[in-house]
Image: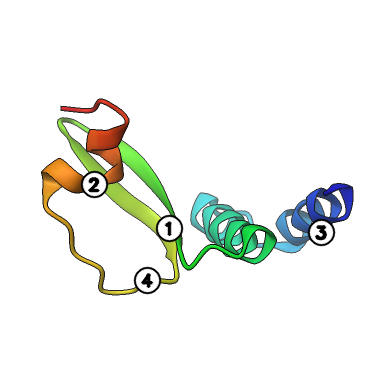
Amino acid sequence: MLETIIRVQRAINSADDSVEAVMQIVVDQACEATGAPGAVVEIAEGDEMVYRAAAGSEGLRLPVSCGSASAAGWR
């Protein structure tokens, strides 16, 4: 686990200075570290949750009631 954390820190340090680049590194590394088929970073914008970075599971569509925002209690 420590090796994974160090790898992610190095990738973030070498990324360009944009928040988007850092979020993309986080989702990519989350998939690699856990073997998950996908990961996302969602940001609350008003009453909506917006995917700002995603890895894997491209094109996946879910009803709002089934999304991760719903599971977290956002409504």
Residue annotated with mark 2? 67
Give percent across and percent down for residue 54: 42, 62
Q: Which of pointers 2 and 4 lies earlier in the amino acid sequence?
A: 4
Element type at marker 2?
loop
Residue annotated with mark 3? 7
At x 87% / y 47%, what residue is drawn? 2
Residue annotated with mark 1? 53
What amino acid type is highlighted by mark number 2?
Gly
Element type at marker 1?
strand
- The answer for how far apart the CA atoms under marks 2 and 1 are is 15 Å
Q: Which of pointers 2 and 1 lies earlier in the amino acid sequence?
A: 1
**Looking at the picture, does residue 40 appear above or below residue 28?**
above
Few, some or many residues within 10 Å of mark 2 (<14, 14–19, 20+): few
- The answer for how far apart the CA atoms under marks 2 and 4 are is 13 Å
Give percent across and percent down for residue 65: 13, 42
Residue annotated with mark 4? 57
Few, some or many residues within 10 Å of mark 4 (<14, 14–19, 20+): few
- The answer for how far apart the CA atoms under marks 2 and 3 are is 30 Å
Mark 2 and mark 4 residues within 8 Å of each other at the beta carbon: no
At x 56% / y 60%, what residue is drawn? 21
**Looking at the picture, does residue 50 appear above or below residue 60?**
above
Q: Quadrant of the C terminus?
A: top left
Residue 63, disc = none
* Image depth: mark 1 or mark 4 in front: 4
In this rendering, position of residue 35 left or right of residue 13:
left
